[in-house]
Image (tube, helix red, strand yellow):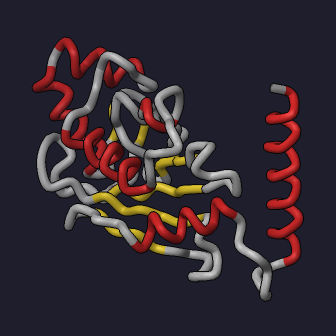
């Protein structure tokens, strides 16, 4: 068991040193190869898009934009950053929401509560699965496993008020003492 941890640590160190050397002629890690395969096989909903702000040479860091076409968040535009480890798919990508949003499963710092990004991650899952999971958070927010407990309580106890709060937040207003940028 200890040998496995040493191998993973060595892979991480090699990946860091490879990243420091730059992209000129370097051999791709297994994680990069798998990610390249995942990205070429993406089958996204029409309301989702992917971009590479650091250029196409940096596949390990990218953004996904989700524009829900149903539910409370209809008409919104939400941007997520993905940071993918060189040991991917043995480690889930790190995902953050750049758009400040009133949502039970996304806190005000952009942390995302999605089971497949935590305890339910398995190497057979891929980027497409994660994006669909994020998309699903906007069509079916889950008050039972919240990061934003206030939003979850309102969704659970008063869905009509939750809808009003979401619209107010997406329009660039305040919910309680918290201001939100316009995202529609």
As rendered, which of 140 and 129 lies closer to the eye? 129
Return the x and y of residue 123 as percentages of the image width and height.
53, 44
Q: How many marks?
A: 0
Determine whether 23 is above or below 173 in the image.
Answer: below
As rendered, which of 135 and 150 lies closer to the eye? 135
Q: In which quarter of the image is the N terminus?
A: top right
- Residue at the spot 35% in from the left edge and 37% down from the top edge: 102
Determine whether 158 is above or below 101 in the image.
Answer: above
Q: Is residue 124 visible?
A: yes
Return the x and y of residue 165 as percentages of the image width and height.
24, 33
- Residue at the spot 52% in from the left edge and 38% down from the top edge: 111
Q: Can residue 167 be seen in this view?
A: no
* Quarter occupied by residue 38: bottom left
- Residue at the spot 15% in from the left edge and 17% down from the top edge: 158
Determine whether 33 is above or below 3 in the image.
Answer: below
As rendered, which of 29 and 75 lies closer to the eye? 29
As rendered, which of 137 and 163 lies closer to the eye? 137
* Quarter occupied by residue 2: top right
**Left or right of residue 52: residue 141:** left
**Left or right of residue 178: residue 73:** left
**Left or right of residue 170: residue 159:** left
- Residue at the spot 31% in from the left edge and 20% down from the top edge: 152
Judged from this view, the residue extending furthest toward the top is: 157
Return the x and y of residue 184 as percentages of the image width and height.
25, 59
Return the x and y of residue 159 as percentages of the image width and height.
14, 23
């Amino acid at each position: 068991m200890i040998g496995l941890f040493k191998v993973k640590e060595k892979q991480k160190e090699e990946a860091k040193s490879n990243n420091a050397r730059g992209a000129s002629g370097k051999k791709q890690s297994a994680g990069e190869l798998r990610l390249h395969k995942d990205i070429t096989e993406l089958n996204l909903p029409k309301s989702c898009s992917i971009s590479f702000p650091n250029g196409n040479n940096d596949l390990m860091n990218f953004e996904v934009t989700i524009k829900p076409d149903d539910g409370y968040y209809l008409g919104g535009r939400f941007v997520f950053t993905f940071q993918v480890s060189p040991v991917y798919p043995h480690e889930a990508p790190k995902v953050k929401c750049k758009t400040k949003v009133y949502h039970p499963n996304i806190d005000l710092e952009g942390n995302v509560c999605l089971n497949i990004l935590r305890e339910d991650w398995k190497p057979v899952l891929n980027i497409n699965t994660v994006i669909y999971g994020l998309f699903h958070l906007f069509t079916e927010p889950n008050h039972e496993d919240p990061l934003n407990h206030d939003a979850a309580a309102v969704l659970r106890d008063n869905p009509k008020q939750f809808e009003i709060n979401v619209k107010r937040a997406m329009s660039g207003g305040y919910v309680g003492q918290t201001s939100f940028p316009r995202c529609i």
